[in-house]
Image (spheres, rainbow, N blue to C red):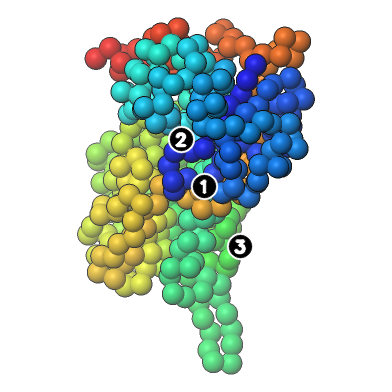
Amino acid sequence: MTIGIPKESDGHEHRVPLIPDTVKKLAEAGAHVIIQKTMGITAGYDDDQYIGAGAQIGTRAAVLANADIILRIEKPPPDEVARLKRGAVHISYLDPFNAKTLVRSLASHHLSAISMELIPRITRTQKMDSLSSQASLAGYVAVILAAERIGRIFPMMVTSAGTLSPARVFIIGAGVAGLQAIATAHRLGARVEAFDTRPAVEEQVKSLGAKFIKIDLGRTGQTKNGYAKELTKAQLAKQQAVMANHCEVSDVVITTAQVFGRKAPRIVTRSMIDRMKPGSVVIDMAVAGGGNVEGSRLDREIEINGVRLIGYANLAGMVPIDASRMYSNNIGNLVLEFWDKENERFVLDLEDDIIKSCLVTHEGRVWNSRFKELYTS
């Protein structure tokens, strides 16, 4: 069975879906791996390293036409869907809640499309959970980016010229990205505060050296997959009123709040930004989902009254070497979980809980029951 890895079509994407270490594991399991020429260069891997791991190097056309399984990071370009083998398995991020035209095209061309975003968060799938692995790196990068932009140091410093107080960092959302941001900011010496609608994360926040900001919002919680539940308008207004005071005194604000499958909640308003000190930095990690911060722009840095708003969607992609290694392990573990070693093939077990959750299209239709209403409306 042939596994194909084309180059990412987005020229700004420097991560790669498979590194030579994972290619070797797949080849040893009996897979025939074909890599588009120079696919791994942006993550520090040349063609010889892939060949040494057991891969064949080919043209993009050869990869697309011959692969029984296609592995990517980003969504496939719409014009390439028809170039894939009928019945092939396509594995990547798909954004199935929003990419309706693409999903319908994958279905109509009889492709079995697996969405990496839909890997369920259960013990068995931790090694496949690319959302968590990439979010952790994104949280780290957000803090490093803020430290570079802020124009002052993070730690307290006592010198003969005077004492420098530590930078104040306020992190909104204590999921995987937020917790990594907290840990990184604390290691750099900042005074860190954090807020999350889920009281259950307070202990984790404190264990990483941050102060947990408590706001009585009434009944909140999280979904069965660990995501924060969407707040009511009244709850969001109360949250914003308290957070405005913390934003005002902070040098860095990092927002990470996302509601899976829905538009990101608007948390930091223009009036809150207007109260912040000139030279402060706000990083909106939810910008791709609509943004937590009023005025943030996708993949841009702008200033409002001296406050810098940063809205890069692919923060993990700024550390492509480590991000590629982690994603490669995730997607490789997914393939090997369903690999029949005796017959050297990938088996779609439609009764398996993982496949039930992440398989979006199959046998010419939108297969996942989660999207039945969305794609029939």
Label 2 crowding class (10 Å Cα cut-off): few <14, some 14-19, many 20+?
some
Q: Is residue 274 depicted above or below 293 in this figure?
A: below
Ranked by sequence position, the earlier of labels 3 and 1 is 1
> What's the mark number on residue 329?
none
Q: Foreground residue, 6 or 24?
A: 6
Q: Residue at x 25, y 54 (%)?
A: 295
Residue position for label 1: 14
x, y (%) of residue 330?
62, 32
Q: Foreground residue, 8 or 240?
A: 8
Residue position for label 2: 74
x, y (%) of residue 267?
31, 48
> What's the mark number on residue 187?
3
Mark 3 touches mark 1? (CB < 8 Å)? no
Which element type, helix, strand or loop, lies under badge 2? loop
Q: Is residue 229 depicted above or below 101 in this figure?
A: below
Q: Foreground residue, 95 or 9?
A: 9
Label 3 crowding class (10 Å Cα cut-off): few <14, some 14-19, many 20+?
some
Q: Classify residue 47 by image quadrant.
A: top right
133 left or right of 267? right
Amino acid type, residue under disc 1 in the picture = His
